Every structure is written in structure tokens, then in C-alpha cells.
Image: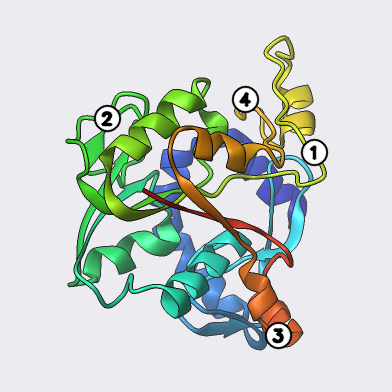
Amino acid sequence: MKKVFKTILNTIPRPVLIRASYFVRPVLALALKGNRFTDPIDEKSFKTFLPYGYGNQRNNVLSPSTLSLERHRLLWLYLKSETNFFSKDLKVLHFAPEQAFYSRFKKQKNLDYTTTDLESPLADVKADICNLPFENDAYDVILCNHVLEHIPNDTKAMQELYRVLKPGGMAVLQIPQDLSREKTFEDNSITDKKERAKIFGQYDHVRVYGRDYFDKLRSVGFKVDAVDYTEKLSKEEVEKYCLAKGEIIPVCYK
């Protein structure tokens, strides 16, 4: 199973995977139905989750029904319990929309919901994050998760995110982060894809963010809360929802 998933993830383009998943998900969900683990996004339970990862695969992390990963389930729980995301009328901009969220957010009557990306078939607006076609102070909420590590000029991208966020608005800017690193690491001289995947987590990542990520966000104007929402959950809940204990949600305000 692990070898099959690794081959699929590393050989099939992501837009194709997204389209194929609509047919595969129901089969996986039925085959793995159980009561050990629960996806809080759709509240379906399974005997196991699936492995996932481009380099070193993680076991029991990919939900068979929504295709959510640890970070998606954690963010869902946070938005549902700690914010007014599902109750207040909000104008939302979502970068590289995740399948786990896309259809659910689209159906939320309280959300004026726009998606954007350069390649995703789920994007309403094809746009470069470093040169956004949106007005200043346009959005109440911005979701931009696991995007910035792909962007060479992440400072420019952060400035654009800050520009289009309304004063008082909230941006969730999740990234893969190595909290053992004080400083973010980049090295463009490493060109071998396997070596880049080993060092950066994926061959198409341009950096590994360290603890200074939050300071960089603050340098462009954001007020940043580094939220460890797993601290509010019981050990049983962390295990039930297959979360990554200690994962930080960067919640930013303008």
C-alpha cells in the first residue's frame, strides 16, 4: 500500500489526482469503514487512515473520505470551535483550495467564497500570489495553507496577502515548519529532485521554515498568534482525529 501511494504521488500530476479522487474516495471510504478513527470534517469513522507523503511516508494520516491530512482536520476543529467562520457573513479568499474544504466552504451560505491558484482546477481565479488581481482591504478571511514554501519570493507573497486582507481580518498561513530550526533554510544550488525531497520535504519546496517564520510575517505588518490548538484537545481526541500533536496554526491579523 505504501509503495503504491508513493508511486502515485510522485508520478501523477496533482490536477489529475484531484479529478481522479472523486471516483476513488467512495470506494476507499467503504473499504476502510470502522470505528477507530474519525474525520471531524464529515464525522465518518474508519478502522484506519491511509499513508501519505512525498518523501518519507507517514502512516495513518490521510482520511479515506475527505482526503484530509492532519493539518486540515486540525484547522477544521479550530475554525469550528474558536472562530465565527461558520456563522458570520464573511468574504473569504482561499489559495490552492484543498479538496477536504472546497465543496463544504462553497456550500456555506454565510461565505462569499473565492478560490485562487495558478494551476488548480478548483480555482475560480487564476492568479500569481505575488501579483494578485484583487483590491486592497478586500477580504475578511484568507486561507493560504502549504503554499508559501513553494514561492521563491515569499516576502512579496506575504505583502500581497497583507494588502488584500481587510483591517481586522484574519489570515491562516500554515506551512510545513521545522520548529527545531531557529532560521529558515534555503539552498537553490541543490537541484537533484531526490535530494531536494530529502532536505525540503518535497522536490518543489524552495525552503524549510524555522521558528523565524512568525517574525517574517510580523515584518510585513501582520499580528501573529502561533496557535497550538492540540493543547486544548484531550489525548484521546488527538488520537481519534489522527492529529499531529504540537502542530502550530499561524493565525495572522491585520
Q: Is residue 163 left or right of residue 10?
A: left
Q: Nearer the viewer, residue 30 or 140?
A: 140
Q: Residue at x 27, y 39 (%)?
A: 164
Disc 3: which residue: 234
Does label 3 or label 2 sit earlier along the sequence?
A: 2
The secondary structure type at the circle numbered 2 is loop
Tag 2–tag 4 contact (CB < 8 Å):
no
In space, the residues marked 3 and 4 are separated at their CA atoms by: 35 Å
- Do callouts 2 and 1 mark residues in contact (Cβ within 8 Å)? no
Q: Which residue is mark 4?
A: 206
**Viewer-closest of 182 and 24:** 182
Cβ–Cβ below 8 Å for labels 1 and 3? no
Q: Secondary structure at mark 3?
A: loop
The amino acid type of the residue labelled 3 equals: Ser
Viewer-side label of 3, 4: 3
The residue beneath circle 1 is 181
Q: Residue furthest right?
A: 180
Instruction: Return the disc, 2 or 1, that comes first in the chain's sequence.
Output: 2
In the rendered image, residue 75, in percent from the top left (x then y), is placed at: 51, 65
